[in-house]
Amino acid sequence: MPSLSPASSTALRILEQMQADLPSQDAIYQPTNFWAQASQPIIDELRQHGFDAFRSLETTRVFFVPTYGAPGGAYTREQFEQLMALVGSMDKPGGKTYQSLLHALSGELWALADYRVLLASSADDKGWPLASFSESDVGAPQEQFRFDGRAFSRSALNYLNGLSFLRQQIGDEVASIRNVLEIGGGFGTLGEILSQLGRFSYIDVDIPPTAAVSSFYLKQQGGEHFTDYLATRELDVIDVPAAPRQMVLCPWQLPKVQGTIDLFVNFISFQEMELHVVKNYLQQVDRLQTRYVLLRNLREGKAVKSDQVRYGVDKPLLGSDYDTLLPNYELLATNVYPFGYRTIDGFHSELRLYRRRG
C-alpha cells in the first residue's frame, strides 16, 4: 500500500466508519442492487491505492467519474488505443487526420459541444457566472479538457449545463437560492461549483464509498468550511447550515436534517435505485419544504438486471414517474437538447425541473 497523504488517511478513516455504521441502518437506506454490486470493488481499490489519485483509478472512472471518451461511451481504453494506432499507421501524430480523429475519439469534441452550450446560455448570467468555472486537479484527473485556459470534466459540464437550464427557466429567482441539497453527489462536483459561485451552503447525502470520496474532494475545496461524517454521526438534529458551510452526510442521517431547502438536485443516481427508495428520499425532500427540484436521469430508465446485466435495477425508474413521486410539485420544464443529450442507442438523458406548489 502506498504511503497516504494526511487528507487521504482521513478519508480512509471516514470510509471505514461509514462502512462500520452501514449494516445497522434501516433497509431503506442500504444500497440497492446496482451499488451493492459496485461498492466493494471501489472500496477495495481505495483501500489499496488511497484517495489522492482517485480520479485515475479504474473502478471510480467506470462508476462515478464520468468520461467523454474511454472508458465510458461506446469503447474501451484498449479499443481507443487500437484505433489510434491504426490511424497512426496512416498519418503522423501531428497530421490533420490523426488530430481530427483524436479530437473525436478522446471525447474532446463532445466536451467542446457542451462547453459551447454553457457559453451560449451565459449571455445573461443572472448573477450566476457559471461560465467562469474552472475545475481543480484534486484526485489526479485524467478526464479533463481545457477550453479558454480553464479545466472542465464531463461531470463539471453536466452540472454546469443543468444549472444553466435552471437559470434559464426561473430567471431572476436564481438569486434567492442560497442552500442546496443533493442526493448522490458523485465525487463532489456540484459542491465545487457552488463554492466558486459564491456564498452557498451545500449538503451532499450519499452512501459509502462515494460519500467518503466526496468528503476528500470537498475538504480540499472548502477547508475549514467543510463538515465531515465524523463530526455529525452522533447528532440527533442536523440543521441546514448557513453559507458557506458544506457537509457530506450518509442517507440514514437525512431524517435528522432540519430546516428548509431552496434547491434539491439529483443527477443520474436515482435511476440506479429502486422506486421505493427514491420515493422515500423525495418524501424527505418534501418534508424540508424544498422550493425547486432539479433532476437528470434517463427518460427510459436504467437497464433491468439479468444474467447479462449485473449492474441493473429490478424495475426502471422512468422520467414520467417523478410526476407521481412529487405530488406537491408542478413540472416547470423538461429538456434533452441542448442541456441534456440523446445516446447513440436512443436513450434520452433528460433534465426535469419542478417547483413546489403554493
Image (cartoon, rainbow, N blue to C red):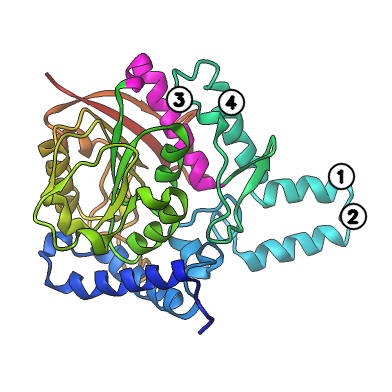
Secondary structure of residue under mark 4: helix
Q: Is residue 352 above or below residue 237?
A: above
What residue would you read off at disc 2?
91
What residue would you read off at disc 3?
128
- The CA distance from mark 4 to mark 1 is 27 Å
Q: Main secondary structure of the magenta part?
A: helix
In the image, residue 103 lies at what x, y percent? 73, 46
Q: Earlier in the sequence, mark 1 or mark 2?
A: 2
Q: Nearer the viewer, mark 4 or mark 3?
A: 3
Q: Report if the CB atoms under discs 4 and 2 are less than 8 Å apart.
A: no
What residue lies at 87% left-to-right and 44% top-to-bottom? 96
- The CA distance from mark 1 to mark 2 is 8 Å
- In this picture, residue 191 sits left or right of residue 147: left
What residue lies at 50% left-to-right and 26% top-to-bottom? 129
Secondary structure of residue under mark 3: loop
Kind of residue sitting beneath label 4: Leu
The magenta segment is: 153-175
- In this picture, residue 204 sits left or right of residue 168: left
